[in-house]
Amino acid sequence: MKKYLSYILIVIAILGLFSPITKLQAATGTCVYKEVGAYNKKGEIVPYSPGHGNTPEEQCGLNSNMEWIPTGTTTPSAPITAYQKCINDGGNYASCNVLAGRPETPPATTTDPNYNLLAPLPNGNETMSTFDPTGAGGGALGGYLNLMIKLFIGICAVLAVIMIVMGGIEYMTTELISSKEAGKERIRNAILGLLLALSAWMLLNQINPNILNTDLKSLASVTVTVDLGGEGTTAITATKGDLSGDGINCTGGGGTSALVATAQSFVGRSTYSQAKRGTVSGGTAYVDCSSFVTQVYTCAGLGNPGGTTTGIFGSATSATNVSADGKTINGTALKVGDLIGWKQGENGEKNGHVMMYIGNGQMIDAQGSGVAVRPVSSYAGRIKYIKPV
């Protein structure tokens, strides 16, 4: 039996330590007034006020004029009175209005979102009796975890004491040298484990106390804006013949039906450059975002849409809602050839950018990485304008 004594003591200690924080309960019933009072009506629901260290049922039982009605209470076998019917309906006003003096409109009731601990936990100079998982109370998960760090160190201390006592008992109750050494080893390990827990906390607290702060609500959100390359302002000098000689589909006609093929013919035959935008040299077309869509439009016989993002979006429609699949803007389906994007300096954008919709939630544009097809949804939060084809 002595062999199992240490394990039994450890189990009892762990159960005793953790039972207050692992048993959580929520209100499962309704508290109502039994009789008419100075500030209440018979059958009226009593609102629960958290923070007193009691469960809703315990708080209801503190007043002799209040009655706790468990959820799912069945109809009594005796003749149903107006009061009983009100209770059986869970305080429904359709039944409760028959009570004398009942107000015409129901009083405001609130739902307690907290978990109520069966036993309050120490938290500095105060005690923690409720836990709000939504974070509305300010503590939420972060406050709970901060408390658990301190509680963990306390558990380590308690377990260390238990192991020291067990080692001492083992050392004193045996004459065998090996058993005495085992008892001494148990004591040394317990002290070492406690020192490790304390030294780890002290070291992290010394480096920066915020390392031990697990308040997730205090983490600041970070927005990363990727610069897609910007655009130049030099005039476009490439001609239809220059682009065609480069292998680009530039017939000067075809309209909207030729836009996709024309735009995709720039892939692998162009290089991104703001300084050389709109030129052709050595069999390579140099483009930035706005010169690219301008040349695509011109090659399809649709004319110059504006030359730069300022010109393209100068009279464009504001995009207030881009769908998650990138197929609609402001509730209207995008059409092949529609130009979308933003202007420089608006909403913190360092540069303007323009893209051309090619269908099925996809667009094609020129960025620093080159001309490529990409999903519209990747830029949904940055798109501010749409210019229909």
Image: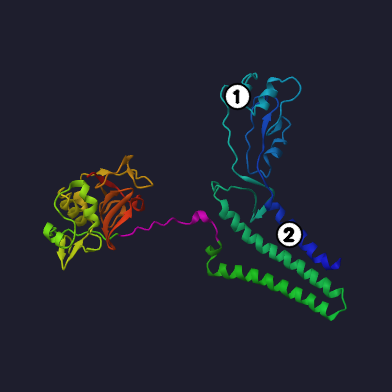
The answer to which quarter of the image holds residue 33 is top right
- Relative to 91, is 369 above or below? below
State the image coordinates of residue 308 (x, y, percent, origin top left).
Answer: 19, 53
* For residue 181, side relative to residue 149 (left or right): right
* For residue 66, side relative to residue 7 (left or right): left
Q: Which mark is residue 14?
A: 2
Sequence order check, earlier mark of 1 and 2: 2
Query: Which secondary structure, mark 1?
Result: helix
Q: Is residue 226 magenta?
A: yes
What amino acid is found at the position of numbered circle 1 in the picture? Tyr
* For residue 221, side relative to residue 380 (left or right): right
- Relative to 63, is 76 above or below? above
State the image coordinates of residue 204 (x, y, percent, origin top left).
Answer: 56, 68
- Circle 2 packing at 10 Å, graded few (<14), some (14-19), many (20+), is few
Q: Is residue 161 magenta?
A: no
The residues colored magenta run 213-227
